[in-house]
């Protein structure tokens, strides 16, 4: 699928940004679009690293914001990753939408976030915002959970699971996009999320396996 094939399905400002770097959509991106990404369908995307998962999230988030359907929240597991995403998204979309990074004080509702379109945060911070009854939460239309396989993490997993459960209850009409390169039970997780499963094994660089011995590598299929 070429980018031009979705020109009439996404906001013009989003398309103008993407066409600078993208001409052909990657397999996972095409599958996501065909599964209803641009129609608001919740998806669980399980594809290798660097296969284009973030762009899938961007298509959903920016479309919802530019079409005035609501805010978007992008959840990552680490503050450093949140800061990285904030820089990347600000560079691409900061000229026409307001983007906020919220990873600090866990004891506040941060009312200023009501003025922002896209909020990048970590699960612990978003959990705190919900517990402090941040009024703008009800305006969220798209929720992206990056590295969603961390549901299985003994430290952060319980918080993330409760957070997703609560958000599904209070944001019944919102689109949830789960992203991961490694999920052992994708079908079960997709069913729990009430999401369509998008899986693909394409990667930009072929992954080779082999055995190293005495200074040489013997590759095998």
Image (cartoon, grey):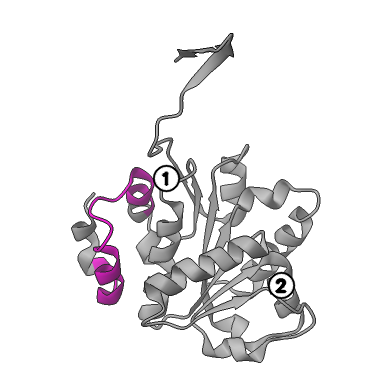
Q: Is label 1 in a helix, a strand or a loop?
A: loop
Q: Which residue occupies the foreground of this view, 201 or 220?
A: 220
Residue position for label 2: 125
Residue 31 within the segment the image draws in magenta: yes
Q: Residue at x 58, y 40 (%)?
A: 182
Residue 123, image x, y percentages:
69, 65
Residue at 21%, 52% (x, y): give it: 2
First-in-chain label (2 vs 1): 1
Q: Nearer the viewer, residue 120 or 134?
A: 120
Mark carried by residue 23: none
Viewer-closest of 10 and 98: 98
Can see residue 7?
Answer: yes
User: For residue 156, what is the image quadrant?
Assistant: bottom right
Residue 14 placed where, x, y %? 31, 71
Residue 108 to residue 85: above or below: below
How many numbered discs sit on the rendered protein? 2
The answer to whether the residue labelled 2 contacts the one labelled 1, judged by CB atoms less than 8 Å apart, is no
Quarter of the view holding residue 8: bottom left
- Spatial separation of the CA atoms under disc 2 and disc 1: 28 Å
**Which residue is the site of mark 1?**
51
Quadrant of the image occupied by residue 168:
bottom right
Report crowding for label 1: few under 14, some 14 to 19, many 20 or more residues within 10 A (C-alpha): many
Residue 100 image offset from top left, x and y in percent: 55, 79
User: Magenta region: which residues?
Assistant: 9-32
Position above or below: 52 against 67:
above
């Amino acid at each position: 699928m070429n980018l031009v094939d979705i020109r009439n399905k996404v906001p013009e400002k989003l398309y103008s940004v993407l066409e600078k770097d993208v001409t052909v959509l990657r397999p996972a991106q095409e599958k996501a679009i065909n599964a209803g990404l641009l129609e608001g369908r919740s998806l669980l995307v399980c594809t290798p690293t660097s296969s284009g998962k973030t762009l899938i999230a961007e298509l959903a988030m920016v479309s919802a914001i530019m079409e005035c359907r609501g805010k978007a929240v992008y959840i990552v597991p680490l503050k450093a990753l949140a800061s990285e995403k904030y820089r990347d998204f600000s560079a691409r979309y900061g000229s026409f939408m307001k983007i906020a990074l919220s990873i600090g004080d866990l004891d506040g509702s941060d009312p200023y976030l009501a003025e922002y379109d896209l909020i990048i945060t970590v699960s612990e911070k978003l959990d705190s915002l919900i517990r402090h009854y941040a009024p703008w939460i009800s305006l969220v239309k798209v929720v992206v959970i990056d590295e969603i396989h961390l549901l299985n993490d003994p430290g952060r997993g319980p918080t993330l699971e409760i957070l997703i459960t609560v958000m599904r209850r209070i944001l019944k009409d919102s689109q949830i996009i789960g992203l991961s390169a490694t999920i052992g039970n994708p079908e079960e997780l997709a069913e729990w999320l009430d999401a369509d499963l998008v899986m693909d094994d394409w990667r930009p660089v072929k992954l080779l396996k082999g055995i190293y011995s005495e200074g040489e590598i013997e590759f095998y299929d």
